[in-house]
Amino acid sequence: MITSAVRGVLFDLDGTLLDHRAAADAGITAWVAERAPGHPRLAEAARLWEALEEPHLAAWHAGECSWQEQRRRRVRALCAELGLDLPDDPDTAFASYARRYREAWRAYPDAAAAVAALRGFRLGVLTNGAQEMQEAKVRAIGLAGQVGPVLTGEVLDGCYKPAPACYTGAAAALGLPPEQVLLVGDDVAKDVTGPAAAGMRSVWLDRLGVAPPPAGFPRITTLAELPALLSGEHLSGHSDLG
Protein backbone atom coordinates (compact mmCIF):
# COMPACT_ATOMS: atom_id res chain seq x y z
CA MET A 1 0.00 0.00 0.00
CA ILE A 2 1.23 3.50 -0.87
CA THR A 3 0.41 5.89 1.94
CA SER A 4 1.73 9.22 0.63
CA ALA A 5 -0.95 11.81 -0.13
CA VAL A 6 -1.81 12.40 -3.76
CA ARG A 7 -0.60 15.83 -4.84
CA GLY A 8 -0.70 15.45 -8.61
CA VAL A 9 -3.11 14.01 -11.17
CA LEU A 10 -2.24 12.94 -14.70
CA PHE A 11 -5.01 12.49 -17.23
CA ASP A 12 -4.83 10.31 -20.28
CA LEU A 13 -6.16 12.26 -23.26
CA ASP A 14 -7.79 10.11 -25.96
CA GLY A 15 -10.72 8.23 -24.46
CA THR A 16 -10.43 10.14 -21.19
CA LEU A 17 -10.70 13.88 -21.84
CA LEU A 18 -11.34 13.79 -25.59
CA ASP A 19 -13.72 11.44 -27.40
CA HIS A 20 -11.11 10.17 -29.84
CA ARG A 21 -13.11 7.15 -30.93
CA ALA A 22 -16.15 9.15 -32.04
CA ALA A 23 -13.95 11.62 -33.92
CA ALA A 24 -11.89 8.93 -35.64
CA ASP A 25 -14.98 6.92 -36.57
CA ALA A 26 -16.68 9.97 -38.08
CA GLY A 27 -13.53 11.03 -39.90
CA ILE A 28 -12.71 7.71 -41.54
CA THR A 29 -16.33 6.95 -42.46
CA ALA A 30 -16.59 10.29 -44.26
CA TRP A 31 -13.21 9.72 -45.93
CA VAL A 32 -14.18 6.31 -47.33
CA ALA A 33 -17.61 7.54 -48.39
CA GLU A 34 -16.01 10.32 -50.42
CA ARG A 35 -13.51 7.99 -52.10
CA ALA A 36 -16.00 5.20 -52.75
CA PRO A 37 -19.64 6.35 -52.57
CA GLY A 38 -21.94 3.47 -51.76
CA HIS A 39 -19.10 1.13 -50.78
CA PRO A 40 -20.69 -2.12 -49.51
CA ARG A 41 -18.37 -2.24 -46.49
CA LEU A 42 -18.66 1.39 -45.47
CA ALA A 43 -20.17 0.41 -42.13
CA GLU A 44 -17.01 -1.57 -41.35
CA ALA A 45 -14.57 1.24 -42.08
CA ALA A 46 -14.47 2.62 -38.54
CA ARG A 47 -13.83 -0.80 -36.98
CA LEU A 48 -11.10 -1.60 -39.49
CA TRP A 49 -9.43 1.79 -38.96
CA GLU A 50 -9.47 1.31 -35.20
CA ALA A 51 -7.80 -2.09 -35.54
CA LEU A 52 -4.97 -0.49 -37.53
CA GLU A 53 -4.19 2.19 -34.96
CA GLU A 54 -2.41 0.23 -32.26
CA PRO A 55 0.06 -1.87 -34.29
CA HIS A 56 1.20 1.03 -36.46
CA LEU A 57 1.45 3.49 -33.58
CA ALA A 58 3.42 0.84 -31.67
CA ALA A 59 5.87 0.64 -34.58
CA TRP A 60 6.36 4.41 -34.37
CA HIS A 61 6.82 4.27 -30.59
CA ALA A 62 9.45 1.57 -31.07
CA GLY A 63 11.35 3.72 -33.56
CA GLU A 64 10.65 1.32 -36.43
CA CYS A 65 9.16 4.06 -38.60
CA SER A 66 8.49 7.78 -38.57
CA TRP A 67 5.24 9.40 -37.44
CA GLN A 68 4.42 10.16 -41.06
CA GLU A 69 5.26 6.65 -42.24
CA GLN A 70 2.91 5.00 -39.74
CA ARG A 71 0.16 7.19 -41.18
CA ARG A 72 1.02 6.05 -44.72
CA ARG A 73 0.96 2.43 -43.64
CA ARG A 74 -2.47 2.80 -42.11
CA VAL A 75 -3.89 4.38 -45.26
CA ARG A 76 -2.42 1.68 -47.47
CA ALA A 77 -3.62 -1.12 -45.19
CA LEU A 78 -7.19 0.23 -45.05
CA CYS A 79 -7.33 0.66 -48.82
CA ALA A 80 -6.05 -2.87 -49.32
CA GLU A 81 -8.63 -4.28 -46.93
CA LEU A 82 -11.52 -2.43 -48.57
CA GLY A 83 -10.30 -2.94 -52.13
CA LEU A 84 -9.84 0.78 -52.75
CA ASP A 85 -7.29 2.13 -55.21
CA LEU A 86 -4.10 3.00 -53.37
CA PRO A 87 -3.65 6.79 -53.32
CA ASP A 88 -0.79 8.20 -55.36
CA ASP A 89 0.09 10.38 -52.39
CA PRO A 90 -0.76 8.70 -49.06
CA ASP A 91 0.30 11.82 -47.14
CA THR A 92 -2.36 13.89 -48.88
CA ALA A 93 -4.87 11.08 -48.39
CA PHE A 94 -4.20 10.93 -44.67
CA ALA A 95 -4.38 14.72 -44.42
CA SER A 96 -7.87 14.54 -45.91
CA TYR A 97 -8.90 12.12 -43.16
CA ALA A 98 -7.08 14.16 -40.49
CA ARG A 99 -9.04 17.29 -41.41
CA ARG A 100 -12.31 15.47 -40.80
CA TYR A 101 -10.93 13.93 -37.61
CA ARG A 102 -9.95 17.35 -36.24
CA GLU A 103 -13.33 18.81 -37.08
CA ALA A 104 -14.92 16.16 -34.87
CA TRP A 105 -12.74 16.70 -31.78
CA ARG A 106 -14.98 17.06 -28.72
CA ALA A 107 -14.33 16.91 -25.02
CA TYR A 108 -16.35 14.46 -23.00
CA PRO A 109 -19.12 16.33 -21.14
CA ASP A 110 -17.56 15.51 -17.77
CA ALA A 111 -14.01 16.66 -18.59
CA ALA A 112 -14.03 20.41 -17.91
CA ALA A 113 -15.83 20.17 -14.59
CA ALA A 114 -13.54 17.41 -13.33
CA VAL A 115 -10.43 19.39 -14.25
CA ALA A 116 -11.82 22.53 -12.60
CA ALA A 117 -12.59 20.60 -9.40
CA LEU A 118 -8.96 19.46 -9.12
CA ARG A 119 -7.23 22.82 -9.33
CA GLY A 120 -5.65 22.27 -5.93
CA PHE A 121 -3.58 19.46 -7.45
CA ARG A 122 -0.68 19.62 -9.87
CA LEU A 123 -2.22 18.53 -13.14
CA GLY A 124 -0.91 17.18 -16.40
CA VAL A 125 -1.81 15.12 -19.45
CA LEU A 126 0.12 11.93 -20.20
CA THR A 127 -0.56 10.63 -23.69
CA ASN A 128 1.04 8.39 -26.29
CA GLY A 129 0.18 10.60 -29.25
CA ALA A 130 2.38 13.06 -31.12
CA GLN A 131 3.24 16.20 -29.14
CA GLU A 132 1.98 18.80 -31.60
CA MET A 133 -1.29 17.02 -32.25
CA GLN A 134 -2.02 16.29 -28.60
CA GLU A 135 -1.38 19.90 -27.63
CA ALA A 136 -3.74 20.95 -30.43
CA LYS A 137 -6.41 18.63 -29.04
CA VAL A 138 -6.14 20.13 -25.56
CA ARG A 139 -6.54 23.61 -27.06
CA ALA A 140 -9.46 22.52 -29.23
CA ILE A 141 -11.44 21.16 -26.29
CA GLY A 142 -10.87 24.29 -24.22
CA LEU A 143 -8.53 22.87 -21.58
CA ALA A 144 -5.28 24.62 -22.50
CA GLY A 145 -3.88 26.37 -19.45
CA GLN A 146 -6.19 24.40 -17.16
CA VAL A 147 -4.94 20.83 -17.26
CA GLY A 148 -1.18 21.40 -16.97
CA PRO A 149 1.57 20.30 -19.34
CA VAL A 150 0.93 17.86 -22.17
CA LEU A 151 3.51 15.08 -21.82
CA THR A 152 4.29 12.64 -24.62
CA GLY A 153 7.23 10.41 -25.42
CA GLU A 154 8.62 13.26 -27.49
CA VAL A 155 9.32 15.22 -24.29
CA LEU A 156 9.93 12.19 -22.06
CA ASP A 157 13.14 10.90 -23.65
CA GLY A 158 11.29 8.68 -26.12
CA CYS A 159 9.42 6.80 -23.39
CA TYR A 160 5.78 5.92 -24.01
CA LYS A 161 3.19 4.20 -21.85
CA PRO A 162 3.52 1.53 -20.48
CA ALA A 163 7.32 1.94 -20.13
CA PRO A 164 8.10 2.61 -16.44
CA ALA A 165 10.32 5.57 -17.34
CA CYS A 166 7.33 7.25 -18.97
CA TYR A 167 5.51 7.43 -15.63
CA THR A 168 8.50 8.40 -13.52
CA GLY A 169 9.40 11.06 -16.09
CA ALA A 170 5.86 12.43 -16.06
CA ALA A 171 5.85 12.58 -12.27
CA ALA A 172 9.18 14.41 -12.35
CA ALA A 173 7.67 16.90 -14.83
CA LEU A 174 5.09 17.71 -12.15
CA GLY A 175 7.88 18.04 -9.59
CA LEU A 176 6.60 15.07 -7.59
CA PRO A 177 7.67 11.50 -6.80
CA PRO A 178 5.55 8.83 -8.55
CA GLU A 179 3.84 7.75 -5.32
CA GLN A 180 2.28 11.22 -4.97
CA VAL A 181 0.75 11.15 -8.45
CA LEU A 182 -2.42 9.47 -9.66
CA LEU A 183 -3.07 8.58 -13.30
CA VAL A 184 -6.60 8.24 -14.60
CA GLY A 185 -7.28 6.73 -17.99
CA ASP A 186 -9.29 4.25 -20.02
CA ASP A 187 -6.58 1.75 -21.05
CA VAL A 188 -5.92 -0.92 -18.41
CA ALA A 189 -2.36 -1.76 -19.46
CA LYS A 190 -1.22 1.81 -20.14
CA ASP A 191 -3.19 3.77 -17.58
CA VAL A 192 -3.74 1.36 -14.69
CA THR A 193 -1.35 -1.55 -14.27
CA GLY A 194 1.52 0.18 -16.09
CA PRO A 195 1.77 3.19 -13.75
CA ALA A 196 1.22 1.01 -10.70
CA ALA A 197 4.33 -0.99 -11.63
CA ALA A 198 6.29 2.27 -11.50
CA GLY A 199 4.97 3.17 -8.04
CA MET A 200 2.24 5.53 -9.24
CA ARG A 201 -1.39 5.35 -8.18
CA SER A 202 -3.99 4.75 -10.85
CA VAL A 203 -7.72 4.66 -11.48
CA TRP A 204 -9.45 2.97 -14.39
CA LEU A 205 -11.96 5.10 -16.26
CA ASP A 206 -14.40 2.54 -17.64
CA ARG A 207 -16.83 4.70 -19.60
CA LEU A 208 -18.50 1.71 -21.24
CA GLY A 209 -18.93 -0.38 -18.10
CA VAL A 210 -17.58 -3.37 -19.96
CA ALA A 211 -15.92 -5.45 -17.25
CA PRO A 212 -14.84 -5.56 -13.61
CA PRO A 213 -11.70 -3.54 -12.85
CA PRO A 214 -8.39 -5.36 -12.64
CA ALA A 215 -7.93 -6.80 -9.17
CA GLY A 216 -6.74 -4.25 -6.64
CA PHE A 217 -7.64 -1.11 -8.60
CA PRO A 218 -10.60 1.24 -8.29
CA ARG A 219 -12.86 1.93 -11.24
CA ILE A 220 -14.91 4.99 -12.13
CA THR A 221 -17.36 5.25 -15.01
CA THR A 222 -17.25 9.04 -15.32
CA LEU A 223 -14.73 11.74 -14.44
CA ALA A 224 -17.42 13.27 -12.26
CA GLU A 225 -16.54 10.57 -9.71
CA LEU A 226 -12.87 11.53 -9.56
CA PRO A 227 -12.96 14.54 -7.18
CA ALA A 228 -14.83 12.54 -4.54
CA LEU A 229 -12.40 9.65 -4.91
CA LEU A 230 -9.54 12.05 -4.27
CA SER A 231 -11.10 13.66 -1.23
CA GLY A 232 -9.43 12.73 2.05
CA GLU A 233 -12.37 10.66 3.27
CA HIS A 234 -12.74 8.62 0.11
CA LEU A 235 -9.05 8.26 -0.57
CA SER A 236 -8.35 6.84 2.87
CA GLY A 237 -11.05 4.26 2.24
CA HIS A 238 -9.27 2.93 -0.84
CA SER A 239 -6.44 0.91 0.61
CA ASP A 240 -6.09 -0.72 -2.80
CA LEU A 241 -5.69 2.55 -4.74
CA GLY A 242 -3.06 1.39 -7.20
Image (cartoon, rainbow, N blue to C red):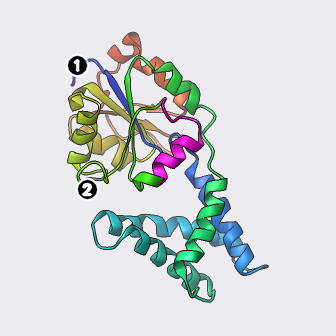
The circle drawn on residue 66 is none
Counting the numbered discs, the total is: 2
Given residues 127 and 184, the one toward you in this image is 127
**Residue at the right extreme?**
38
Q: Which residue occupies 50% across, 27% down?
A: 115
Q: Earlier in the sequence, mark 2 or mark 1?
A: 1
Q: Is residue 137 magenta?
A: yes
* C-beta proximity under 8 Å, tags 2 and 1: no
The circle drawn on residue 4 is 1
Amino acid type at circle 1 is: Ser
Given residues 128 and 103, the one toward you in this image is 103
The circle drawn on residue 158 is 2
Q: Is residue 134 magenta?
A: yes
Q: Helix, strand, or loop for circle 2?
A: loop
Q: Helix, strand, or loop for circle 1?
A: loop
Which x, y percent locates residue 218?
A: 39, 31
Quadrant position of residue 195: top left
- Give me the C-alpha separation between circle 2 and circle 1: 28 Å
Which x, y percent locates residue 79?
A: 58, 82
Q: Residues within 10 Å of mark 1 (few under 14, many from 20)?
A: few
Q: Which residue occupies 67% across, 71% down?
A: 31
Quadrant position of residue 4: top left
Q: Is residue 37 above or below residue 128?
A: below
Q: Is residue 13 above or below residue 24?
A: above
The rendered magenta stretch, by its main secondary structure, is classed as helix
Q: Quadrant of the N terminus?
A: top left
Quadrant position of residue 95: bottom right
Amino acid type at circle 2 is: Gly
Residue 208 visible: no
Q: Is residue 2 left or right of residue 68?
A: left
Start and end of the magenta stretch?
133-145
Residue 57 visible: yes
